[in-house]
Image (tube, rainbow, N blue to C red):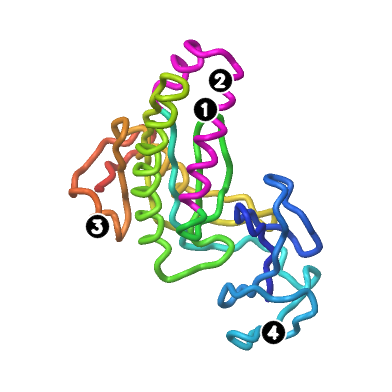
Amino acid sequence: MTTTICGECGHGYEPGARFCEHCGGAITRRCESCGSEVSPTTRFCRSCGAAMTDGSAREAQASLKVVSVVFSDLAGSTALQEALDPETVRTVMARFYEAMRAAVLHHQGAFEKFIGDAVVAVFGKPVVREDDALRAVRCAAAMVAVLAQLNDELERDHGVRLRMRTGVNTGELVISSEGILVGDTMNTAARLEQAAGAGARQGKGPRARSWAESQTVSVSGRRRRAST
């Protein structure tokens, strides 16, 4: 089987799309078994031998996958936008999104969406790798480091510094035939982000302890407390 994804931002599409509607990047065709890029006429993957199928042969049913979600949001963004003129805010946010996009793509993550001043990235969609959770954690750490470097530039040019909270969660999600992610894993990543202090990261899952001391936090909207 094959999947088509944007080579720039990692957004998934049904076969036939040529350019990404999110960033304008070229759409590439990849093997769903190993993630290798294949040509439009390929019948069998040259890397793993899996048979390729077109969109009509793909199952329309939703699928259950284990993914890792990175959810980051800027702290104090309302006050920032009140202090700056709209054009400066646009410039600052454009640089922020550019820097975060580069960090996610470097760790082979896929952008799920930009929500206002929040960034959501998913590891395990459309291609699943055995180290998705580890790469998500490393990506979160890289995003914090990249923001520290970006802040030097923003302070020099615009007199502002951004503060960011980040949550990482690994768990099961249902992915619909339209590519929509549904499940508590996404919600918990957002709640962990809200529980983190500005400039901090909160994690939940098998790799969390590689970069954060184990602790238990009360996550809003959940009956159970989350061990991180």
Ranked by sequence position, the earlier of labels 2 and 4 is 4
Circles 2 and 4: CB atoms closer than 8 Å: no
Q: Main secondary structure of the magenta part?
A: helix
Separation of residues labelled 2 and 4 (CA atoms): 50 Å
Q: Secondary structure at mark 4?
A: loop
Choose the circle earlier in sequence order: 3 or 1.
1
**Residue bearing mark 2:** 88
Badge nearest the viewer, 3 or 2? 2
User: Crowdedness of circle 3 by 10 Å Cα count: few (<14), some, many (20+)?
Assistant: few
Query: Which mark, by number, is residue 51?
Result: 4
Q: Amino acid at mark 3?
A: Ser
Real-space Cα distance between discs 3 and 2? 38 Å
User: Which region is colored magenta?
Assistant: 75-104
Residue at 55% x, 54% y: name it. 110
Task: Residue 78: give its label.
Answer: none
Q: Quadrant of residue 7?
A: bottom right
N-terminal label among 3 and 2: 2
Task: Indicate the amino acid at tag 2.
Answer: Thr
Q: CA distance from mark 4 to mark 3?
A: 37 Å
Mark 2, secondary structure of its residue: helix
Mark 3 — residue? 210
**Residue at 33% from the left image edge and 39% from the top image edge:** 223
Secondary structure under tag 1 reads helix
Query: Is 144 one of the magenta-colored residues?
Result: no
Residue 55, placed above or below residue 26: below
Question: Do the CB atoms of the residues marked 4 and 1 lie less than 8 Å apart?
Answer: no
Q: What residue did someone put label 1 on?
A: 92
Mark 4: few/some/many CA within 10 Å (<14, 14-19, 20+): some
Name which of mark 4 and mark 3 comes first in the sequence.
4
Mark-to-mark CA distance, 2 and 1: 6 Å
